[in-house]
Image (cartoon, helix red, strand yellow):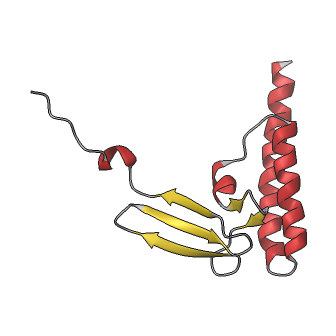
Amino acid sequence: MAGKKELMRSIATERMIILFRLSKEAMQKDREIARSYIKLLYKMSSHYKIGVPGDIGRLTCKKCMDVLVPGISCKVVVASSAGYVIYRCNGCGREKHLYYKNRLAAAPKIKDA
């Protein structure tokens, strides 16, 4: 049975990627259709008990189910000293912080005495 579950999960992951691609294309024309694709994507993820692929999870707003497209549905702020990029959703105002520097490299180093 493990083979069947893995097959179903891989098909669901492919479908989630397709839905995300369709929602990005639909964002230009109709935001409600794009939101419905994202809602369906998250329903699929909970139904098949798999996580949303990394890039998709980073580029969607979980509060208003919007696709975060810079300049269209979100504002992008670079916090270079802190090492992350802030995506601020235009629909609900929620912020996502995406780190681009390694957190462990930025942590203070402890010297052994």
Q: Residue at x 61, y 70 (%)?
A: 88
Residue 26 position within the rendered picture, expressed as x and y whole percent measured from the top left: 84, 74
Up/down of 84 relative to 5, above or below = below
Q: Is 29 situated left or right of 80 in this image?
A: right
**Which image quadrant: the C terminus?**
top left
Instruction: Tell which residue pokes out farthest to the top in this image.
Output: 1
Instruction: Tell which residue pokes out farthest to the front in this image.
Output: 93
Residue 36 position within the rendered picture, expressed as x and y whole percent measured from the top left: 89, 62
Residue 86 position within the rendered picture, expressed as x and y whole percent measured from the top left: 53, 67
Q: Nearer the viewer, residue 16 or 75?
A: 75
Residue 41 position within the rendered picture, expressed as x and y whole percent measured from the top left: 83, 52
Q: Which residue is drawn at 58% across and 68% down?
A: 87
Q: Is 69 situated left or right of 1 in this image?
A: left
Which image quadrant for residue 108? top left
Q: Residue at x 87, y 47 (%)?
A: 43
Up/down of 42 relative to 60, above or below = above
Q: Nearer the viewer, residue 76 or 51?
A: 76
Q: Is 58 situated left or right of 48 in this image?
A: left
Q: Is 106 situated left or right of 84 in this image?
A: left
Q: Residue at x 76, y 37 (%)?
A: 50
Q: How many labels does the image show?
A: 0
Instruction: Tell which residue pokes out farthest to the left in this image.
Output: 113
Which image quadrant for residue 39? bottom right
**Which image quadrant: the N terminus?**
top right
